[in-house]
């Protein structure tokens, strides 16, 4: 530092030296703490030691000396001492200025780092990367060898991140935090080198600063800084640490929220795709047959559902149609519905004669183990219409309501004669037969129709459904189907749809 001051204050020092030479001094010099000359007036070779010298000091320590050559009395020595003190004051001022400059630079670095902290955690939604950024900036601001972050959530394993990456045992985190929390109910701890807990750790830690902040209910963040590079942690470090912690917790909560939104968006997108796939698996058009009117539609209660209907044109002038309702709702029901569709379609296309009970038996045998594994079942109605003989054959594994409305009589329920598919290893359904006359009508719905509720918890019920069919019997099949959905919606009012609603209508033309 003394050499720098000699360079920056050369004019003042030159005037001081000239004043001494004018007073009779042979030479003036300034030496550093090792006695080496760093400035001299005039430039000549000096022999021996100076006649008088006075120390130049900084904070009570000598960093050099002011020398003169020549024989002088006591007042001159006092003058030399005063000049040396003058130089010492210049050194002190320069030192303070340098420290202030360093402090300003450090504060600027801290502000920039805090800004970087806010920017980084604001734009980065990756939780682990977010924690890494927090640890890196914390180590930089507090000037520590290591910083770490631990995200703790109820019911989940802690997520620790260390900067720079070190092999710190995972068991250390829980033991450390638990030990600190047992000591007091504070959320910030400062451990010095002689603390007993530091000696228990399996990592080299001289000092440790730890803070715990609540991010949201059930989620907390542990911030830590270890091994201060210069000395120990002091009050400014604690204040800065708190300054880091507050925005870190808020920004981390924002990152978690953004991650949750992204996850929900991804799930919603996947569910929407699943809904599109499921709806594409249902018939997009009903078969066009000269003797039959056909109509069908399904309205899931959620994005995807467990209701399924199908029309399959097979061999031997045979139309197979089915409506099933898988227990439960949502994705599990939709997956089993897809399996049921695959088996039914594959077996139905191979059939040349009507045997709905055999189709149910083969399907039950194929899927029984899968349904039992997930403790689910499906009600299944299968009809097969021979449009040469005008005979409707059907079999029913637990499905209701199935409504037959003859042209010359009121609507009646056709009860199931077997438990749902997947309940027993074999299907007990038997083949039933109806001589289907012109004007006869068959309506198969899922229980989402009969069990539709109003806000007072009253259900639509079978009686209303039978009356509705009698009221709408004169309408074409497509118009009847739309009117049935409208009637259910008007009945339910503001009560949300709680179950999938599916209807299939078959009518023989007059």
Image (tube, rainbow, N blue to C red):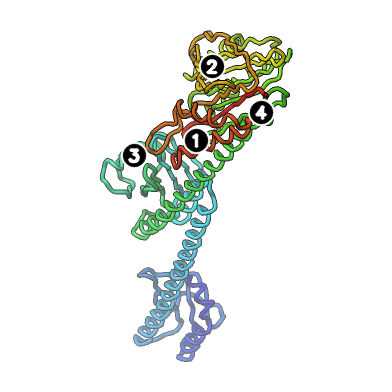
Q: Mark 1 and mark 4 in contact (Cβ < 8 Å)?
A: no
Label whose residue precedes the other's in the sequence (2 or 3): 3
Q: Is residue 133 above or below residue 59?
A: above
Q: CA distance from mark 4 to mark 3?
A: 72 Å
Give how far across and how far down residue 121 sits, in percent.
50, 52
Q: CA distance from mark 4 to mark 1?
A: 23 Å
Secondary structure, mark 3, is helix
Residue at image mark 2:
370
Q: Which quarter of the rendered picture does the C terminus lie within?
A: top right
Q: CA distance from mark 1 to mark 2?
A: 34 Å
Dot 4 alpha-carbon crowd within 10 angstroms: few under 14, some 14 to 19, many 20 or more: some
Residue at image mark 1:
488
Q: Is residue 224 above or below residue 414?
A: below
**Residue drawn at x 30%, y 44% as measured from the top left:** 195
Residue at image mark 3:
199
Give how far across and how far down residue 29 sits, in percent.
49, 78
Label whose residue precedes the other's in the sequence (1 or 2): 2
Residue 313 quadrant? top right
Q: Is residue 304 shown left or right of residue 49? A: right
Give how far across and how far down residue 273 sits, in percent.
61, 36
Residue at image mark 4:
283
Dot 3 alpha-carbon crowd within 10 angstroms: few under 14, some 14 to 19, many 20 or more: few
Q: Mark 3 and mark 4 in contact (Cβ < 8 Å)?
A: no
Label whose residue precedes the other's in the sequence (4 or 1): 4
**Residue drawn at x 45%, y 26% as measured from the top left:** 463
Q: CA distance from mark 1 to mark 3?
A: 73 Å
Dot 2 alpha-carbon crowd within 10 angstroms: few under 14, some 14 to 19, many 20 or more: some
Residue 59 visible, this angle: yes
Nearer mark to the viewer, of 1 and 3: 1
Secondary structure, mark 4, is loop
């Amino acid at each position: 530092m003394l050499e720098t001051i000699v360079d920056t204050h050369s004019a003042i020092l030159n005037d001081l030296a000239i004043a001494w030479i004018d007073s009779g001094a042979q030479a003036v010099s300034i030496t550093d703490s090792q006695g080496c000359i760093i400035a001299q007036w005039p430039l000549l070779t000096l022999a021996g030691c100076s006649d008088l010298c006075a120390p130049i000091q900084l904070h009570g320590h000598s960093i050099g000396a002011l020398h003169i050559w020549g024989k002088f009395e006591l007042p001159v020595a006092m003058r030399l001492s005063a000049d040396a003190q003058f130089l010492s004051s210049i050194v002190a001022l320069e030192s303070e200025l340098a420290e202030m400059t360093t402090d300003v630079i450090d504060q600027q670095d801290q502000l920039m780092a805090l800004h970087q902290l806010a920017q980084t955690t604001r734009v980065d939604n990756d939780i682990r990367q977010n924690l890494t950024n927090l640890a890196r900036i914390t180590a930089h601001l507090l000037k520590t060898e290591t910083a770490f972050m631990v995200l703790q959530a109820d019911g989940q394993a802690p997520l620790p991140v260390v900067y720079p990456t070190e092999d710190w045992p995972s068991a250390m985190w829980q033991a450390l935090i638990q030990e600190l929390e047992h000591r007091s109910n504070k959320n910030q701890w400062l451990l010095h080198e002689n603390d007993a807990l530091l000696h228990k750790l399996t990592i080299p830690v001289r000092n440790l600063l730890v803070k715990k902040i609540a991010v949201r209910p059930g989620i907390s963040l542990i911030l830590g800084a270890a091994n201060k590079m210069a000395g120990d942690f002091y009050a400014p470090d604690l204040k800065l640490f708190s300054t880091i912690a507050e925005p870190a917790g808020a920004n981390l909560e924002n990152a978690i929220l953004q991650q949750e939104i992204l996850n929900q968006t991804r799930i919603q997108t996947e569910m929407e795709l699943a809904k599109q796939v499921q709806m594409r698996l249902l018939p997009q058009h009903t078969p066009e047959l000269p003797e039959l009117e056909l109509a069908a539609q399904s309205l899931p209660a959620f994005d995807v559902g467990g209701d399924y209907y199908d029309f399959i044109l097979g061999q031997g002038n045979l139309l197979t149609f089915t409506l099933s309702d898988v227990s439960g709702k949502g994705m599990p029901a939709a997956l089993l519905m897809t399996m049921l569709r695959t088996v039914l379609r594959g077996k139905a296309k191979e059939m040349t004669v009507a045997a709905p009970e055999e189709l149910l038996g083969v399907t039950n045998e194929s899927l029984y183990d899968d349904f039992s594994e997930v403790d689910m079942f499906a009600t299944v109605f299968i009809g097969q219409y021979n449009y040469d003989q005008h005979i409707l054959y059907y079999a029913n594994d637990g499905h209701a309501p199935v409504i037959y409305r003859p042209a010359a009589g009121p609507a009646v329920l056709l009860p199931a004669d077997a438990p749902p598919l997947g309940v027993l290893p074999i299907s007990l359904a038997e083949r039933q037969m109806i001589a289907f006359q012109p004007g006869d009508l068959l309506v198969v719905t899922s229980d989402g129709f009969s069990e539709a509720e109003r806000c007072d918890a009253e259900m639509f019920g079978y009686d209303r459904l039978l009356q509705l069919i009698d009221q709408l019997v004169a309408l074409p099949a497509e118009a009847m189907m739309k009117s049935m959905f409208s009637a259910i919606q008007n009945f339910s009012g503001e009560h949300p749809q709680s179950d999938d609603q599916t209807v299939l209508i078959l009518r023989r033309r007059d």
